[in-house]
Image (cartoon, rainbow, N blue to C red):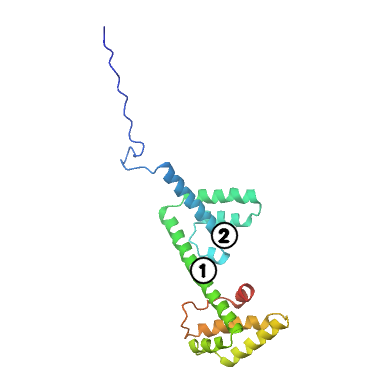
Amino acid sequence: MTRKTRIQPIETPDAGLDEETGYDRPSKSQLKREMLALQTLGAALVELPKDALKRMPMPEELADAVLEARRITDHEGKRRQLQYVGRVMRSLNDDETAALRSALDAYRGVNKAETAKLHWIEQARERLLADDSALTEFLRTHPGADAQAGRTLIRNARKEAREGKPPRYFRELFQWIKSASEAGGASDDAGPANTTEDDDDDNHA
């Protein structure tokens, strides 16, 4: 009886290796994570304020896609456009995506610091309105501040609050604290930010 010869299966190259280079190929899960990260980065660009967006180093195709996404208000249309932004993001090279991440991180760091400074001004204003002794401490740490102006603003802000009047002096006190701190001499960890008066009054007064 003739013995059958068992045929050994032909070994295929390791699925994780590139046949030409021999280097490990990214796994499907790794590629999925990278795609998601680029999609998230693209969405973050769409959400940026206009002035910050102008400072992002975006290629023309990406800039056009991002601006179009910002323009669309329809939910489904915006979702599709965000997906397109993600596809454009995947066409960028490593240097381009690294530059975008660096610029976005820099913006977020500055924005976080400015927010903290504005909160510090608001807290200082609350302390000044709540406690007379707070002005003495403020003038000690900010010797360049106009003490008489500060006293007048505090007094008028308290009065308009009692009488239910528009917060004119309340807002002016914010600017007084901001200016005094920017003049130097503050010993606090967080100082006021260099922002426009209109934005401060509308958003933080």
Q: Nearer the viewer, residue 41 or 33?
A: 33
SS under mark 2? helix
Point 45% across, 48% down: residue: 33
Residue 158: quadrant of the picture: bottom right
Q: Please state which of residues 122 and 96 is positioned toward the viewer in this rendering.
A: 122
- Residue 165 lies, with reference to residue 46, above or below; the image says below
Residue at the image point whose x is 33% and y is 36% from the top: 14
Vertical relation: 14 (above or below) 68: above
**Element class at badge 1:** helix
Quadrant the C terminus occupies? bottom right
Furthest toward the bottom, the residue is 148
* Amino acid on which disc 1 is placed: Asn
Q: Residues within 10 Å of mark 1 (few under 14, many from 20)?
A: some
Q: Residue at x 47, y 67 (%)?
A: 109
- List the residue tagged with mark 1: 111
User: What is the number of callouts on the image?
Assistant: 2
> Does residue 63 appear to the left or right of 169 in the view shown?
left
Pointer 2: residues within 10 angstroms few (<14), some, or many (20+)?
A: few
Percent of width and height locating residue 28: 43, 42
Q: Which residue is mark 2?
A: 47
Image coordinates for residue 80, horizontal then vertical, percent: 59, 48
